[in-house]
Image: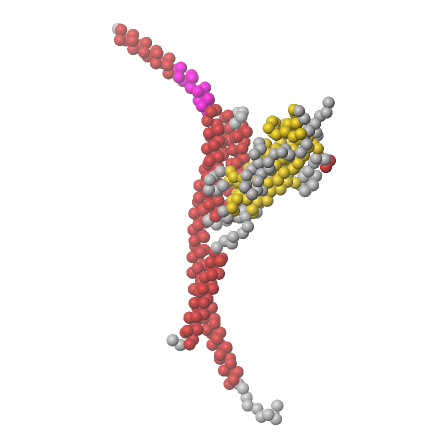
Amino acid sequence: MSEDLQRALTVFVSACLIFSMLAYIAATPQPKEQFFQLYALGENRMTEDYYPNDNSTIPLDTPVKWFLGVTNFMGSVEYVIVKAKLGSQTSQPPNETNTTPANLPTLIEFRRILLDNETWETPFTWKIVNVETKSETAFLTLNINNKTITVQDIGANNGCNFRIIFELWTLDEETKNQIFGWKTQGQRRAAWLQIWFNATIATT
Amino acid sequence: MNATRSAFILLILSTLFISLTLVSAPPILATSEQSNAPEEIQNAEQQFKEAFAAVREAEAAGAEENQIAALAERLNLALNLIEQAKRDGQGNSSNTYETVAQAAYICNQLQDEAHQLRDAARKSSDYNKILVFSAVPVAALIVTLCVHYGLKWLRRSEVDHVMKMEIKEKGEA
């Protein structure tokens, strides 16, 4: 075999190997970090003005306006559910480590199909329409997005330190059930947030 | 004569029975419709989940973004209809049926379209892969030829350079 042919064969085989690798990289989607972003904004769509007159003690029938937002960075179309729950200071919040949701009644939930990289925002307007006091513990009746809900299980001492918890749930592809958080590369992740407030109790 | 009378009485009785059945039919149907409403909603939700899974399959197969966006928009429409049916379910049941039926229809359509899209995307993706991998030996051959003739040209230019050299005396320069 001539020296030229030997060299040509070496170059050809090497080029084949390099181009095959490049083709494989081009044909295989690159793994990227998969996550959701969950946020709540104040009435001016900023991270401020969460309470009327900047006072976290909410009087009766005073509307409070927030905006809830979710961004999908999962790399695929996703079915998301945002659940709003009412809690007090003694309520157990969701656990990110065990990915267990808060064991609290769901006030309202929002469902949406989100494309990859899509952000979805929805208004969350609520007010306290009634406060029932039983031995210094206040129980609330809320009106959220024109839906009135009485929460009899959750009360707060003197109406202090209530919180609204927002949890992000998704539809699990394997079980076709709703799960708290989402699955990514065999692991469970969760996103939730909470906003504290006090309820004004009418004094006689 | 007795047989005729019995036949006549039997005829009257059967007519009465049939008319009673017909008269009582609508309330029975209405009751059964009301009790089936949550079941219908559950069915629609199941169809929605299947449609969603089909859209995800189409996306994973490599369908174009704008096509997936169009399907997602209609999925959201079906989702809103199911939510509306759940709200109406507490009140007017005929509205609920219409809404649920509409949602189910959209989901069925979506599922079919998503499957078609998935198949088309898979085909296109397979063609692309074949094209990319079959381009490998062609590209390698082009590189080999370039290297071969490039080296040849370099060698010739070196020889030409040597051939063009002139012998000069030391003092001439």
Q: Residue at x 32, y 12 (%)?
A: B11
* Residue A99 visible in the displayed image: yes
Question: Magenta stretch mostly in which secondary structure?
Answer: helix
* Residue B142 visible in the displayed image: no
Tell me the quadrant of the picture where the N terminus of chain A can be found: bottom left
Front-most of residues B73 and A57: A57
Vertical arrangement, residue B90 with respect to residue A22, above or below? above
Image coordinates of residue A17 in percent, x first then y, are 45, 64
Image coordinates of residue B95 in percent, x first then y, are 51, 27
Quadrant in the picture for residue A113: top right
Please count the marks in the image: 0
Image coordinates of residue A141 in percent, x first then y, are 63, 27
Residue B20 forms part of the magenta stretch? yes
Front-most of residues A83 and B27: A83
Q: Residue at x 34, y 11 (%)?
A: B12
Q: Residue at x 70, y 27 (%)?
A: A201
Residue A192 forms part of the magenta stretch? no
Vertical arrangement, residue B32 with respect to residue A85, above or below? above
Give, as a single range, the part of the protein colored magenta: B19-33
Front-most of residues B98 and B76: B76
State left or right for residue B149 relative to residue A57: left
Tell me the quadrant of the picture where the C terminus of chain A can be found: top right
Q: Residue at x 56, y 46 (%)?
A: A35
Image coordinates of residue B77 in percent, x first then y, are 53, 37
Colouring used for the render: secondary structure
